[in-house]
Amino acid sequence: MFPNRSVQLCIFFNYRINPIGLVESKYSKKKRLIVDLSAPHNDKDHPSINSLIDKDSYSLSYVTVDDAIKSIQKLGKSAWMNKADIQDAFKLLPIKQSLWPFYSIKWNNNYYFFVCLPFGSPSSPKLFD
């Protein structure tokens, strides 16, 4: 279930368990693990990981089709274009070791922590970009 080194067995005394789920890709129908870093919801005593991340610092705007068309028109007919989709892109980026206990999950009565960015953090796309 977990690729090579992106998740490890939990070895901490203090850690935070985050809910997990599966999301199906629109196109490939492949399922991927998502960590609900927005949980717990509306809990003032225990803020979620996502609520502690500054949204303005990690906002990201994607290139639109209109942007691509403008670039093609500007560069002319001899221009080359490329699009890449990197599988498990976030898992290429390590999480700071001191933050590992906050990225824990429970699966089959075992506790694990992420050592690389999970799918479910609002900072992941910006950090990868």
Image (cartoon, helix red, strand yellow):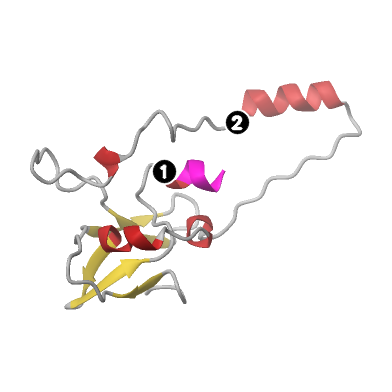
Residue 79 occupies which quadrant of the picture?
A: top right
Q: Magenta stretch: residue 83 in it?
A: no
Q: Which residue is mark 2?
A: 63
- Dot 1 or dot 2: first in sequence order is 2
* Magenta stretch, residue numbers: 125-129
Q: Main secondary structure of the magenta part?
A: helix
Task: Say which quadrant the N terminus sits in.
Answer: bottom left
Q: CA distance from mark 1 to mark 2?
A: 18 Å
Image vertical order of residue 121 relative to residue 29, above or below? above
Q: Residues within 10 Å of mark 1 (few under 14, many from 20)?
A: some
Mark 1 against mark 2, which lies toward the viewer?
1
Whether residue 61 sits left or right of residue 58 in the image: it is right
Image x and y of residue 66, in percent: 64, 23
Amino acid, disc 2:
Val
Q: Residue at x 17, y 65 (%)?
A: 14
Instruction: Give the side of residue 36 with respect to residue 76, left or right.
Output: left
Residue shown at 24% from the left, 65% from the top: 105
Task: State the residue at coordinates (30%, 56%).
Answer: 35
The image's mark for residue 123 is 1
Query: Residue 103 location, x and y as percent?
Result: 29, 59
Q: Which residue shows up at 16% across the image and 78% down it?
A: 109
